[in-house]
Every structure is written in C-alpha cells, then in structure tokens.
C-alpha cells in the first residue's frame, strides 16, 4: 500500500467539493515558471501535491506547504483542466506507477450534481507537473 493512501482516502471520503486550485510555480530569471506543486482546496481540507525533485515522484502533504525561494503561488489559469472540476467531489483517485516502479503520476475523477464527470491527470516530468484533462470517447 502507498504511503499516500490516507491522504487519498481523505480527499475522496471526507473532503467534499473542490473549492479552489492554486499552482506553485518555480521562477528562475527569464525562464517561464513551471508548475512544481498544486494546492487543492476542498470544503474540508487542503492538500499540496508536489514533485519530489530527487526522483520525480508524487508527494502529497496535508495542508498548504510553505512557499520556497524562487516560487510564486497563484490561482490555476482559466484554461486549466481544474476549472471543470471546481464544485465537484473526487470520486476516484489513482496513483500512477511507471515501468520502473516509481509513483510519478496521479489521476482524479470528479463528479458533481447534474454535471458531466471530469478526469484530471498529473504526471511528474523533470521536477514539474504536466497536467491534462482525460477525455473518453
């Protein structure tokens, strides 16, 4: 069982609806900031999902982690996949494991009253998150 099992179960069973999403961006000079962490705010708690820089694996911390030097925090952009998930509850959360056995991704399935379900996937690559909306046919 994963070390993240308790946090995942809490997000599904106890957290309620997603109320806000913030991106933590690593800023280095003129290089555009990449998303190094995502803060998910639910009705009943917040969790920070970050990338462990040592091995590019998922890290989940209850609450909001302190911002480090060279980082900025702001709301997820309007075109972000998270926008569709706002106001919905996490029904399923999967930890994704690559061919080398590293847990380097996480996927959320959100559901809400009278709304189309929404699935958001995050994959760790080069110490940053690649975030996308999963579409089904």
Image (spheres, rainbow, N blue to C red):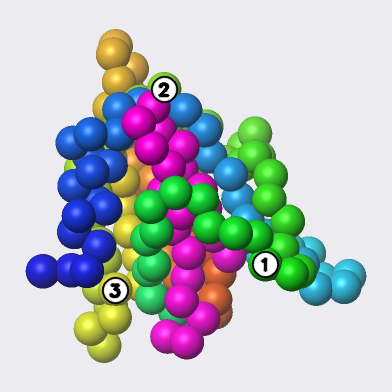
Question: Which residue in the protein does label 3 denote?
Answer: 103
Question: Which residue in the protein does label 2 denote?
Answer: 87
The residue shown at (55%, 69%) is 128
Please rate how many residues cluster around mark 1, counting C-alpha atoms within 10 Å: few if below 14, some from 14 to 19, many from 20. Answer: few
Q: Is residue 112 above or below residue 83?
A: above
Horizontal and vertical percent for residue 123?
Answer: 42, 65
Which of disc 1 and disc 3 is earlier in sequence?
A: 1
Observer-nearest of 84 and 49: 49
Give the CA separation, mark 3 to mark 1: 24 Å
Give the CA separation, mark 1 to mark 2: 29 Å
Mark whose residue sits in front, 1 or 2: 1
Q: Main secondary structure of the magenta part?
A: strand
Question: Which residue in the protein does label 1 denote?
Answer: 68
Horizontal and vertical percent for residue 12?
Answer: 22, 39
Q: Which residues are magenta?
A: 35-55
The residue shown at (23%, 43%) is 10
Mark whose residue sits in front, 3 or 1: 1
Which of disc 2 and disc 1 is earlier in sequence?
A: 1
Q: Is residue 113 left or right of residue 124?
A: left
Please rate how many residues cluster around mark 2, counting C-alpha atoms within 10 Å: few if below 14, some from 14 to 19, many from 20. Answer: some
In the rendered image, the quadrant that contains the C terminus is: top left
Horizontal and vertical percent for residue 103?
Answer: 29, 73
Q: Is residue 124 left or right of residue 110?
A: right
């Amino acid at each position: 069982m994963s070390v993240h099992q308790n946090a995942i179960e809490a997000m599904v069973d106890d957290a309620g609806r997603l109320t806000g999403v913030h991106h933590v961006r690593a800023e280095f000079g003129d290089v555009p900031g990449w998303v190094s962490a995502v803060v998910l705010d639910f009705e009943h708690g917040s969790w920070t999902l970050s990338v462990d820089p040592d091995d590019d694996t998922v890290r989940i911390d209850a609450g909001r982690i302190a911002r480090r030097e060279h980082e900025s925090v702001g709301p997820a952009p309007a075109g972000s996949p998270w926008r569709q998930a706002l106001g919905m509850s996490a029904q399923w959360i999967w930890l994704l494991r690559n061919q080398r056995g590293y847990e380097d991704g996480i996927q959320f399935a959100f559901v809400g009253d009278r709304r189309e379900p929404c699935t958001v996937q995050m994959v760790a690559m080069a110490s940053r998150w690649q975030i996308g909306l999963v579409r089904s046919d």
